[in-house]
Image: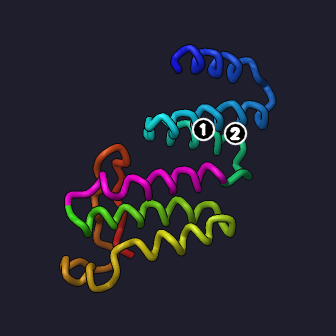
Amino acid sequence: MSEANKYYTQAESLETDPIKKWKFVYARADKNRKAGRLGKARQLYREALKLNPSNKNPYLRIAGMYASSANKCGSDAFNKRAVYWAAVNEAAKAGSSGSAAVRRYKALAPDKTMIFSKSMKSGDPIKIGCWIGLTVRVP
C-alpha cells in the first residue's frame, strides 16, 4: 500500500487539472477508507472537496464513516448514538443528494426520551472521541 500511495501522490503532484487531480485524491481516500484508516480518509476527502466543491460525494463518504463508527466511538448507548448527529451534519452538507442519508442518520440518533433521561437540552455539547474527535450539539 505504501508503494501505491507513493505513485498516487506523485501522479497528484504532476496533475494540473483540478478535476483529474480530484480523481486521484478521491481514489486514495477510498483506498484508505477501505483499509480502515478513517482519519486519513477523512483528510483526503476534505482535500477532494477543495479540488472539486461541486461533487458532494466526499461528504456522504465521511458521514458513512462516522455512522459505521458509532458503536466504537462512545462510552454508553447515548454517546454512541450521538455519533449519528455528526453523520447528519456531514450528510447535510451534500445538499439534496444527502437527504436520504440525513433522514436515516437522524432516525438512529438519540430521541427526545434519551436526551431527557440524560438531562440534556438543545444546544448542549457532546464530545465524540476516537478517530472522529468532534463536538456535536444536541439539536
Q: Is residue 57 above or below residue 115?
A: above
Q: Position of residue 126 (x, y in %)?
A: 28, 63
Answer whether labels 2 and 1 touch (C-beta < 8 Å).
yes
- Which residue corresponds to the image point at 33% horizontal and 67% vertical from the top-left? 81
User: Which residue carries the number 1 mark?
Assistant: 47
Identify which residue is drawn at 34% across, 66% down.
Answer: 82
Disc 2 marks a residue whose amino acid type is Leu
Viewer-proximal residue among 124 and 77: 77
Residue 3 is situated, as x and y percent measured from the top left of the image, at 56, 14
Judge left or right: residue 105 versus residue 6.
left
Where, by quadrant of the figure, is residue 113 drawn?
Answer: bottom left
- CA distance separating discs 2 and 1: 7 Å
Whole-percent x and y of residue 46?
57, 43
The residue lying at 64 percent from left, 40 percent from top is 48
75 vs 54, left or right, is left
* Picture coordinates of residue 21, whole percent (x, y): 73, 31
Along the line of sight, the residue nearer the viewer: 94 or 137 = 94
Q: Residues within 10 Å of mark 2 (few under 14, many from 20)?
A: some
Would residue 126 be counted in the magenta stretch?
A: no
Q: Amino acid at mark 1?
A: Glu
**From which residue to which does the magenta span run?**
57-75
Residue at 19% from the left image edge and 77% from the top image edge: 118
Does the magenta stretch mainly form a helix, a strand or a loop?
A: helix
Query: How many C-alpha atoms fall within 10 Å of the one at disc 1: few (<14), some, or many (≥20)?
Result: some
Reply yes or no: does residue 74 show up in magenta: yes
Disc tally is 2
Pointer 2 residue: 51
